[in-house]
Image (cartoon, rainbow, N blue to C red):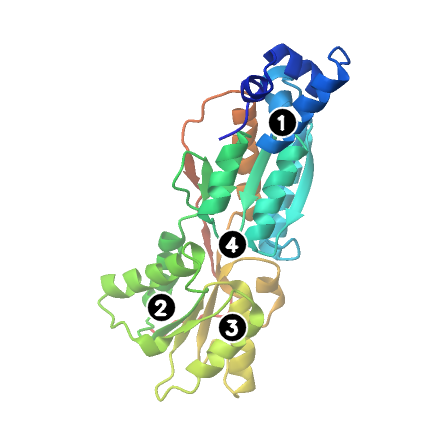
Amino acid sequence: MAVTLKDIAEKVGVSESTVSRVLNGIPKASSETRERILKVAEELGYYPNDLARSLAKQKTHIIGVIITDISNSYFASVTGGIEEIASLFGYSLIISATGGNENEELKYINILKEKRVDGIIFMSGRMPHSCEQALLDTGIPTVVVARKVKSSLPSIHIDNIGESYKAVEYLIKLGHRRIAIISGTFADKESGYHRLLGYKNALADYELPFEEELIEEGDFKMDSGRRAMEKLLKLKELPTAVFAASDAMAVGAIKAIKKAGLRVPEDISVMGFDNNVISQACDPELTTIGQPVKDLGRKAIEMLYKIIQGKKLEKMAIYLPCELIIRNSTKSLI
């Protein structure tokens, strides 16, 4: 819970207005009183932006963006969408890349609080309870991207289960019956686990057998897709199609298939998920599920701006649709 001026005033034994003047740098209190107030404020963990937000109502016109990896095309594209709209609203961004480290995420949440940002957009590989609580405790308007939250924090997503289902259903309608998946890490309870669940649901609805040997785990990066595909290629009966939970892993799978002397899609069809630049740069061009990554960023900053302006959101969780993009890496068996 955020520390208030009243908390400091009661502990020091002065009025809230005296605390306000000291923390605003107005030299009307004695040096002894000033020192006591500053000491108590530090001990209680009071941050200057509490005053800026609750009393002075100052605005910095800065938005803090916490992401995992700015070099990752997904995070870079979402951030690009945020920046595009933020500039129209007259906001600058502070971008903090954490590497997905929980301690780093907590550190940057506190730094953004100290910087008196007007709002925070949080998009990481997961949503630890500690980070969710820390975001709530700041009292700063916050929007979460692509992570489900248990609290009242607003969020924006895609339907990973439904979109993964769409990808596998497309392969099934092409006549494929032995379909493998290279999933994201199982520890990722959002995109990784949910895309695997969509795969399972599609198989069940079309009465196809679920086989553990057709599931390989990756980490959304190209090399993990290559390693996973190499394991699938050792199976006695090869899959006719592979659904990779990211374009990067799909390209890694294509590399492994070609290295084994097989062809895509003539021998094995490959489908990805993302529609980033690599999907069109690979050979053959990749059939994939296109995420509205820039729109995720645009909608996130639009939601945040409404909250900052004191407007009520119509929905606390928004889901944006994806698009099935058919290219040359998949083949009909019918």
Q: Which residue is mark 2?
A: 174
What separation in Å lies between label 4 and label 2 (alpha carbons)? Answer: 33 Å
Q: Which residue is mark 4?
A: 125
Q: Earlier in the sequence, mark 1 or mark 4?
A: 1
Quick check: marks 3 and 2 in contact, CB under 8 Å? no
Amino acid type, callout 1: Val
Q: Earlier in the sequence, mark 4 or mark 2?
A: 4
Q: Quadrant of residue 330?
A: bottom left
Q: Earlier in the sequence, mark 2 or mark 1?
A: 1
Q: Earlier in the sequence, mark 3 or mark 2?
A: 2
Residue at disc 1, secondary structure: helix
For residue 241, say whether it is visible: yes
What separation in Å lies between label 3 and label 1 (alpha carbons)? Answer: 54 Å
- Nearer the camera: disc 3 or disc 4: 4
Within-10-Å neighbours for mark 4: few <14, some 14–19, many 20+: many
The residue located at (64%, 44%) in the rendering is 80
- Pick the residue in front: 98 or 237: 98
Q: Which residue is mark 1?
A: 40
Q: Which residue ends up furthest to the left in the rendered image?
A: 207
